[in-house]
Image: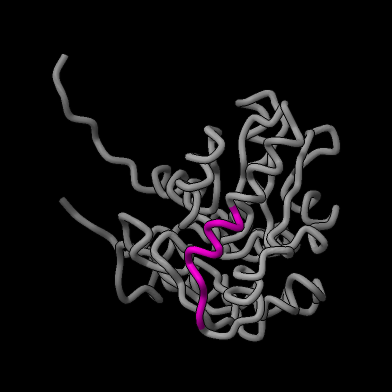
């Protein structure tokens, strides 16, 4: 068998997924998008310089597009086969990043919403870091049509989440965040009897997906379900078995 190099700029191989991460500082638990042990395959990270949670969530700073594109091109040059994000609010730049590189881009977990609605035929619950920051532009950027029924719950009222993640103090209360996200999920379910599934928008919430599912009995989608799905399309393996 003869092998050929994909890229002259690639000095190593084996990473299908490149991940754009924010410029932030707190513990990244297993299950978090920014923890490499979350995955059963190697991933590569690139920090988007200057992209803090404040600038992305609360300011929706349009000038961030330049460092986002620079980081995406860096990952492409390093040989990854697709690029994801590590914050659902990167939906703002999904189209621009995708247009700037030659490999697939799935910057936001919100991209799954149309799929989730199609397979359930029901309302999609979204648990977001801060519901006051989730705007129509985030839905437009990820192809969420106006006729898709949504139920949105935010973590902005949960002190453990706001202190551990948004305040960026360098420590977090794992049990406190778990209780908070379960409370938000149960509230959504209580308020919407047509809820078919829950999507965890925030990249810090997948460690609690199991707890959310245990509490609601619903399918739970997040960044990790999306990343695993795309990885499978890029690293197909032959089947073995008997007939």
Q: Which residue does the image show at 55% across and 73% down from the upper left?
A: 21
Q: Is residue 169 magenta?
A: no
Residue that protrudes farthest toward the top in the picture: 243
Q: How many marks?
A: 0
- In this picture, residue 225 sits left or right of residue 110: left
Q: Is residue 1 above or below residue 151?
A: below
Q: Which residue does the image show at 70% across and 43% down from the upper left?
A: 187
- In this picture, residue 172 sits left or right of residue 184: left
Quarter-wise, where is residue 130 in the image? Answer: bottom right
Residue placed most toward the observer, 66 or 171: 171
Residue 210 pos. (x, y %): 45, 46
Quarter-wise, where is residue 55 in the image? Answer: bottom right
Q: Is residue 145 above or below residue 194?
A: below
Q: How is the image coloured?
A: one colour
Residue 153 pos. (x, y %): 73, 50
Residue 31 pos. (x, y %): 43, 59
Q: Is residue 63 above or below residue 236?
A: below
Q: Is residue 175 magenta?
A: yes
Main SS of residues in magenta: helix
Residue 11 pos. (x, y %): 32, 76
Instruction: State the quadrant of the C terminus.
Output: top left
Q: Which residue does the image show at 69% across and 46% down from the upper left?
A: 126
Residue placed most toward the observer, 27 or 231: 27
- In this picture, residue 19 sits left or right of residue 163: left
Q: Which residue does the image show at 60% across and 70% down from the upper left?
A: 160
In magenta, the rendered stretch is 171-181
Residue placed most toward the observer, 193 or 200: 193
- In this picture, residue 62 sits left or right of residue 232: right
């Amino acid at each position: 068998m003869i092998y050929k190099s994909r890229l002259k700029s690639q000095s190593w191989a084996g990473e299908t997924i490149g991940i754009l991460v924010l410029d932030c500082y707190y513990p990244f638990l297993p299950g978090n998008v920014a923890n490499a042990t979350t995955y059963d395959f190697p991933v590569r990270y690139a920090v988007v310089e200057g992209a803090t949670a404040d600038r992305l969530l609360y300011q929706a700073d349009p000038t961030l597009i330049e460092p986002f594109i620079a980081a995406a091109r860096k990952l492409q040059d390093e040989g990854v086969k697709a690029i994801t994000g590590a914050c659902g609010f990167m939906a703002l730049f999904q189209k621009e990043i995708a247009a700037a590189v030659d490999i697939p881009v799935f910057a936001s977990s919100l991209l799954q919403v149309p799929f989730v609605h199609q397979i359930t035929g029901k309302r999609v619950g979204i648990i977001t870091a801060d519901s006051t920051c989730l705007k129509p532009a985030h839905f437009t950027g990820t192809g969420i049509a106006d006729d898709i029924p949504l139920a949105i719950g935010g973590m902005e009222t949960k002190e453990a989440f706001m202190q551990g993640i948004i305040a960026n103090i360098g420590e977090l209360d794992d049990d406190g965040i778990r209780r908070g996200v379960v409370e938000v999920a149960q509230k959504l379910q209580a308020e919407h009897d047509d809820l078919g599934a829950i999507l965890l928008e925030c990249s810090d919430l997948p460690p609690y997906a199991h707890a959310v599912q245990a509490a609601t009995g619903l399918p739970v989608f997040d960044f990790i379900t999306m990343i695993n799905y795309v990885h499978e399309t890029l690293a197909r393996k032959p089947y073995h078995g008997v007939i």
